[in-house]
Amino acid sequence: MFQKIRNKKSDASVLSDMVDKQRRYDSLVRALHTDIYRYAFWLCGDKHVAEDITQETFLRAWRALDSLKDDKAAKAWLITILRRENARRFERKQFDYSDVEQEQLEDVFSSSNEDETEQYWLRRQIGKLDIEYREPLLLQLIGGFSGDEIADLLELNKNTVMTRLFRARNQLKDALDSPELRGQSNG
């Protein structure tokens, strides 16, 4: 008899824990899904891939939700999961290499109207930055992270992060000041 009562109590406790976990997860998804997707899109540049790695990020977050001790750190925690998911994409994928330089390939996916916009130009310039400069810049611009948070996410010294952010901005500024890079003529 006592065993049945104890089992009912433990069953109720497990059910309560699951309901609490589901509520916590749902609020996490509602609050951060847009930011996580936006960052995923910036990483991969493809809507469908961004959706896939965002979904995989939240699936892994569900599995490891108990390891998130501070809800204030949830965004950084999810970004870390997302970065690892994106890296896993390349571990699984076998690339066909070509002798053609990327700069010589014609961009057949962009519309001519989009080529003329400043936003498209800026996105392309950011995409041309070395990953060591691009990643902290995107974490700051898209993720809204501080230098300290970026340093923690990338496992770098804060001064290194700040230097990379400074250099990334200077490279973008130099590109903005260079008429050749913008397709404008001097004559």
Image: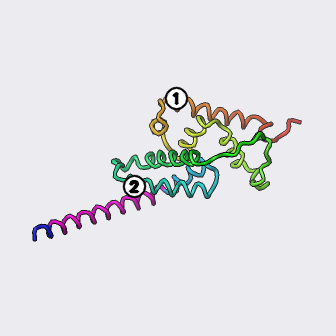
First to last magenta residue range: 6-32
Where, quadrant-wise, is the C terminus in this rendering?
top right
Q: Are marks 1 and 2 in contact (CB under 8 Å)?
A: no
Q: Position of residue 18 (x, y in %)?
A: 31, 63
Left or right: residue 76 compared with residue 128: left
Q: Residues within 10 Å of mark 1 (few under 14, many from 20)?
A: few
180, 133: nearer the viewer: 133
Q: Secondary structure at mark 1?
A: helix
Magenta stretch secondary structure, dominant = helix
Relative to 155, does residue 3 appear above or below in the rendering?
Answer: below
Residue furthest to the right in view is 187
Q: Secondary structure at mark 2?
A: helix
- Point 54% across, 42% down: residue: 140
In the image, what residue type sits under mark 1? Thr
Q: Residues within 10 Å of mark 2 (few under 14, many from 20)?
A: few
Indicate which disc residue 160 carries: 1
Q: Position of residue 21 (x, y in %)?
A: 34, 60
In the image, what residue type sits under mark 2? Arg
- Point 72% across, 36% down: residue: 175
- The part of the image, by quadrant, that contains residue 10 is bottom left
Indicate which disc residue 82 carries: none
Indicate which disc residue 63 carries: 2
Queried whether the magenta region covers residue 24, the answer comes back as: yes
For the residues labelled 1 and 2, the Cα–Cα distance comes to: 33 Å
